Image (cartoon, helix red, strand yellow):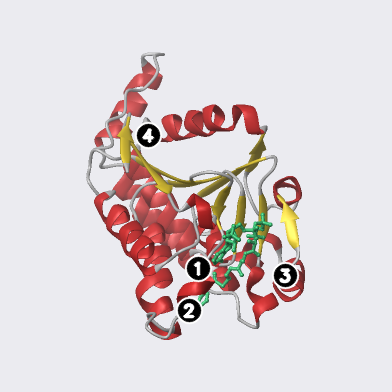
Amino acid sequence: MQVEKSIAIITLNRPEKLNSFVREMALLLQQKLDECSANDIRCVYITGMGRAFSAGQDLTEVTTPSGPGFGRILSEHYNPIVTKIRELQKPVIAAVNGVAAGAGANIALCCDIVIATESASFLQAFSKIGLIPDSGGTHVLPRLIGWQKASALMMLGEKISATDAERIGMIYKVFPDESFREEAMKIAETLAQMPTKGLAYTKQLLHLSQDTSFHEQLNDENIFQQRAATTQDYKEGVQAFLEKRPGKFKGE
Ligand code: LHQ
């Protein structure tokens, strides 16, 4: 993990196996996500080394008798990873630099902002090998693109291009391969200079909204808005507006 301009850059790094997950990589990612709760980190950027984002579970690990086994793979690898991403009190960007398959796709999709290169693709690979989509995919994907498209993509296991993924609302934006890193880092830099607590409350409210009624959500917005109003960044934001200058936010 590198930290640059308050951005923690996490690179999944097993390029020869398309950054597929073995236990060691899954535990290391969790450790790095834990380190991202430090106050000096204000945005997290997850990407892959080489030509893939991640091909999901390394299928040689599940076929090894001494491997961790299915139950532990979910409860000790993927479930904690996606939970940590959702619970981090700062924006997490998935910068999808190539194919994202299986758990690799669903880890990307649970991030707050998902961007991808034009040549990237997404693949709910599970059905092809007789498994069910995990890592939160059955919760997140239908909410992103609707029940029907999620159901078809998950059952057919068809690869979808990043451009199509953007068109149907699965991801935020696609950038040309050549300028991807630059464009992606611009987004990360913008987020890392914004009022971090306000963004964290926004993230929490969006997640809460998945399970609450409109009236409960209005109540939650009231609570979180009052919290946001106690931050230094709110005071700075209003002051900067009144003084007609850009705000200088510290994430406090
Ligand atoms: C791989 C993998 C891989 C090992 C490429 N494993 N080597 C949860 C609970 C418990 C158990 C199971 O899993 C899960 C969650 C899951 O994620 S299940 C879904 C697992 N992932 C997949 O089924 C995807 C498998 N991979 C693919 O379909 C293709 O590799 C994709 C479409 C990702 C990329 O295709 P290509 O661009 O044609 O690359 P490739 O297939 O030639 O792969 C390059 C190398 O990477 C190759 O190794 P080699 O030594 O022959 O060069 C592959 O064997 C290896 N690799 N994915 N998941």
Image quarter where the C terminus lies is: top left
* Residue identified by numbered label 2: 62
Labels 4 and 1: the sequence-earlier one: 1
Left or right of residue 55, residue 80 in this image: left
Label 4: which secondary element: helix
Q: Residue at x 35, y 28 (%)?
A: 237
Front one among 247 and 33: 33
Tell me the kind of residue under disc 1. Answer: Asp
In front: label 4 or label 3: 3
How many numbered marks, from 0 up?
Answer: 4
Label 2: which secondary element: helix
Front one among 36 and 128: 128
Label 3 environment density (alpha carbons within 10 Å; few <14, some 14–19, many ≥20): many
* Residue identified by numbered label 4: 192
In front: label 3 or label 1: 1
Q: Residue at x 65, y 67 (%)?
A: 124
* Residue identified by numbered label 3: 157
Between the residue at mark 4 and the residue at mark 3, the CA separation in whole angstroms equals 36 Å
Label 3: which secondary element: loop
Labels 3 and 1: the sequence-earlier one: 1
Between the residue at mark 3 and the residue at mark 1, the CA separation in whole angstroms equals 17 Å
Tell me the kind of residue under disc 4. Answer: Ala
Left or right of residue 112, residue 26 in this image: left
Q: Position of residue 139 (x, y in %)?
A: 56, 71
Between the residue at mark 2 and the residue at mark 1, the CA separation in whole angstroms equals 7 Å
* Residue identified by numbered label 1: 58
Q: Position of residue 44 (x, y in %)?
A: 39, 44
Labels 2 and 4: the sequence-earlier one: 2
Between the residue at mark 3 and the residue at mark 2, the CA separation in whole angstroms equals 20 Å
Find out whether the residues at labels 2 and 1 contact each other: C-beta distance under 8 Å: yes
Q: Position of residue 84 (x, y in %)?
A: 35, 61
